Image (cartoon, rainbow, N blue to C red):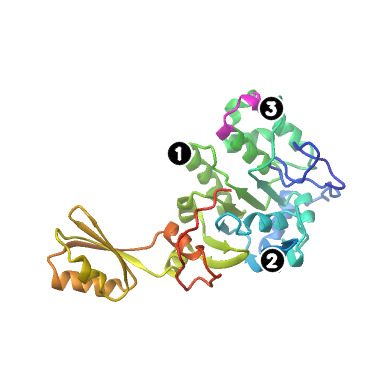
């Protein structure tokens, strides 16, 4: 990376460990540009603004004129199947690549400038750690690359690794190394934190503790953008879900709004001997499934199905549920032409795992 050091990456290929999108040596922060000065960013320019941003690699158009605005303090899940354009979009936001056309800004400035000022940190899947350093030495090493950081002990406490400070990185588990990356990303006290599969390698308790810390940060005004293949994390922790497919945004809203875009509900009832043919012939019914003494009906007109079951059959214990985020994900990012999110899609996509 011109003008700056290469961190934890032999040959400087352009992706690092975690401070990770790091660090072009910008001029030192002026007095007042530490965490107090950075508070002035909130309430001004958007945290992230993409305006008709496209990215091409030869004949391949990885990102197709995406326009997206993320306000300071939002927690946004950025989801899509493999090859959807998520990584290419994140790379542009981190200044690791330039858009082929369009514009990308982070808090009103060029992404590389924002990264260099410590306004942005990232936890990425790629990039290595120096195995022969201890956890504490690694944090101290990275802190020396900034003109101002949070205290090393503080970020290690926040990340839950203070108890293994003297352990060699090479002796740490995958989950412990991920928490180390989190501590490193917190050092410059960034206004924007980008997380790529942040809980990979963590156990259930570790994942819960991680998201508790993230929600605390968000409550204090930090902007969080994360990609995950744990769709229940997006459902539980994101204020907003953005689905991308083939380089385009196909859904953008709360988890409830995204679920609503994928038309359809599930009707479940206790019915010992259902007439599957008659139920299947009802308008809007896409499938009928028997499980023991229960019948499960996937349909677009749940009220009509419910009336039939209650009036024409001895069905009881009737339940109507909306599609979950995973079902909406599959419907909105499946094969076929790109959609705005209002049309059902063929299934076939798998949740993104990297």
Separation of residues labelled 1 and 2 (CA atoms): 34 Å
Query: Would residue 89 appear left or right of 268 to someone viewing this image?
Result: right
Q: Residue at x 53, y 73 (%)?
A: 340
Q: Nearer the viewer, residue 171 or 328?
A: 328
* Mark linked to residue 204: 1
Give the quarter of the image for residue 200: top right
> Which residue is tagged 2?
50
Q: Nearer the viewer, residue 55 or 253?
A: 55
The picture places residue 221, in percent across and down from the top left corner, at 61, 55
Which SS class for mark 2? Answer: strand
Query: Would residue 44 appear left or right of 266 to someone viewing this image?
Result: right
The picture places residue 278, in percent across and down from the top left corner, at 20, 71
Q: Which portion, as a residue range, is magenta?
A: 168-176
Which SS class for mark 1? Answer: helix
In the rendered image, the vertical position of residue 142 relative to residue 85, given as above or below: above
Mark 3 and mark 2 in contact (Cβ < 8 Å)?
no
């Amino acid at each position: 990376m011109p003008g700056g050091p290469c961190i934890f990456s032999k040959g400087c290929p352009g992706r690092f460990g975690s401070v990770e999108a790091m660090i072009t040596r910008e001029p030192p922060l002026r007095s007042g540009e530490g965490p107090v000065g950075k508070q002035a960013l909130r309430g001004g320019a958007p945290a992230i603004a993409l305006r008709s941003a496209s990215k091409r690699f030869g004949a391949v158009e990885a990102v197709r004129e995406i326009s997206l605005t993320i306000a300071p303090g939002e927690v946004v899940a950025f989801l899509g199947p493999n090859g959807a354009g998520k990584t290419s979009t994140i790379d542009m936001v981190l200044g690791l690549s330039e858009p082929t056309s369009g514009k990308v800004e982070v808090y009103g400035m060029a992404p590389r400038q924002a990264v260099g000022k410590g306004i942005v940190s990232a936890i990425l899947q790629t990039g290595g750690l120096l195995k022969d350093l201890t956890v504490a030495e690694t944090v101290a090493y990275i802190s020396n690359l900034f003109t101002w950081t949070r205290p090393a002990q503080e970020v290690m406490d926040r990340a839950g690794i203070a108890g293994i400070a003297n352990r060699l990185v090479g002796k740490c588990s995958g989950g412990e190394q991920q928490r180390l990356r989190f501590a490193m990303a917190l050092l410059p006290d960034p206004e924007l934190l980008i997380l790529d599969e942040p809980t990979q390698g963590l156990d259930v308790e570790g994942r819960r503790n991680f998201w508790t810390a993230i929600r605390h940060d968000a409550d204090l005004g930090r902007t969080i953008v994360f990609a995950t293949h744990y769709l229940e994390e997006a459902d539980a922790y994101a204020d907003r879900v953005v689905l991308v497919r083939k380089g385009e945004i196909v859904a953008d809203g709360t988890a409830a709004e995204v679920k609503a875009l994928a038309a359809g509900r599930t009707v479940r009832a206790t019915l010992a001997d259902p007439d599957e043919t008659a139920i299947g012939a009802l308008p809007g019914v896409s499938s009928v499934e028997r499980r023991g003494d229960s019948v499960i009906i996937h349909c677009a007109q749940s009220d009509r199905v419910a009336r039939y079951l209650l009036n024409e059959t001895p069905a009881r214990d009737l339940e109507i549920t909306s599609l979950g985020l995973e079902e909406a994900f599959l419907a909105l990012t499946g094969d076929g032409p790109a959609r705005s999110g209002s049309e059902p899609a063929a299934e076939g996509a798998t949740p993104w795992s990297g």
